[in-house]
Image (spheres, helix red, strand yellow):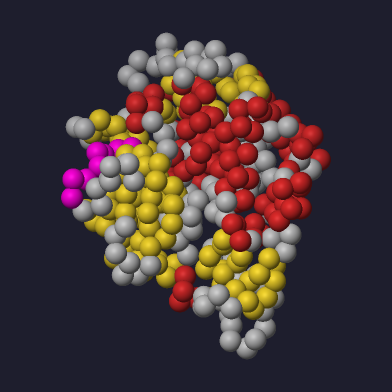
Amino acid sequence: MTDYTWDRKRKGVKVAVLMSGGVDSSVAASLLHQMGYNLLGITLRLFDETLVPPAKAASAEQSIRDAKSVSEGFGFPHQVLDLRQQFRDLVVEPYQDTYLAGATPNPCVHCNPTIKWGMILNRGLGVSVDRIATGHYARIILGKGGPRLEKAKDLSKDQSYVLWGLNRSWLMRTLLPLGKWTKAEIRNEASRLGLDVADKPESQEACFIDGHYVSHLLEMRKTELARIGEGPIVDKAGKQVGMHQGYYRYTIGQRRGLNISDGHGPYFVIDVKPESNTVVIGANADLEHGGCLVQQVNWLSFRPPVEPMTCTVKIRYNDTGGPAIVNPPDSNGNITIRFIQPRRAVTPGQSAVWYRGKTLWGGGNIERALEVGEARP
């Protein structure tokens, strides 16, 4: 096995390095520049600044300036690509739709294959390059069966989870310079290089919202949400125990905002039913599930199993993962995952991502949770 990150001959290899204006992508660009690649710095303009709070718009413009400054400092060209329409159609509106469907989205998971890799490598924007590079913390390894995606050296920063949707053929055209680095080492390298972004804080939210997602929905889908109005909060037996201001305000596992004080709590959201504008609550134990059904599956590094196989499954980005059994795909390509031990708060709309050791085997969207002991559907 070899680390498939670098070409032997680099001078003539043109690389589109995606630069957000942050420390990670800036250092990634610097490392590639030092290696002799022919770089084109690209910053994506993704959302209409008039539709976000002024502070968010100002931050986006500053990020473009920061990326351009880094590119100019190292002497390679920089370009801003306007993808606002594509981003709205492929990421923002599906993000909103997912909440209105009673599920919980992860926009980064869908932005990577549709916007970043998809738009650049498919040449839909007229950008002709040999490779694409990003500041994601993950590694690409070349083995006997071809390339595969692996976790980063710095497991606390590993971002392989959000890359499960990439086309496997793209791995051979992708450079991930930060895979062998820790975050602390990247900060130190940025300081050594004298980059102005060395101490720039990281964003902790979706790039197109500022604050809580509900505020974003209320602003962008005002008419639809006004029609939803109040609805009941019910227990597992269907008994009404309270009222809420709209089901879209609640996600699986949520405890805050229920405002139920009957002396039998604490209570948690265990189901959201948009068709009846109903929120179902239960005890913490009711959040334990035995598995999940997964759709839109992508087998990134290895082929699908022909019989049930044990692996490690993450059910959300910050999940450390747990042992599970991945079953062969059904006739529609969907799979059933069975947890070895029950897992808490399996949430439709989130991604299930399964690993064999450090290698990301595949991933997909969670369609629904399976109860402990529930027969395979």
**Residue 79's x, y, as percent?**
63, 19
What is the residue that sits farthest to the bottom in this orientation? Answer: 263
- The residue drawn where x is 48% and y is 28% is 117
From the top left corner, tell me how far across and down residue 99 is, in percent: 60, 51
All told, the count of numbered labels is 0
* Lateral position of residue 61 relative to residue 247, left or right: right
Image quadrant containing the C terminus? bottom left
What's the magenta bit mostly, secondary-structure-wise? Answer: loop
Nearer the observer, 376 or 197: 376
When asked about the image quadrant of residue 228, the answer is bottom right
Q: Is residue 51 left or right of residue 326?
A: right
Span highlighted in magenta in the image: 300-307
Residue that appears at 60% across and 45% down: 97
Report if residue 79 is visible in the image.
yes
Place of residue 93 in the rendered image (x, y in percent of width and height, measured from the top left) = 63, 39
Q: Camera-side residue: 159 or 376?
A: 376
Asked if residue 306 lies in the magenta stretch, the reply is: yes
- The quadrant in which the N terminus is found is top left
Asked if 177 appears above or below 286 in the picture, the reply is: above
Among the 4 quarters of the image, the one containing residue 145: top left
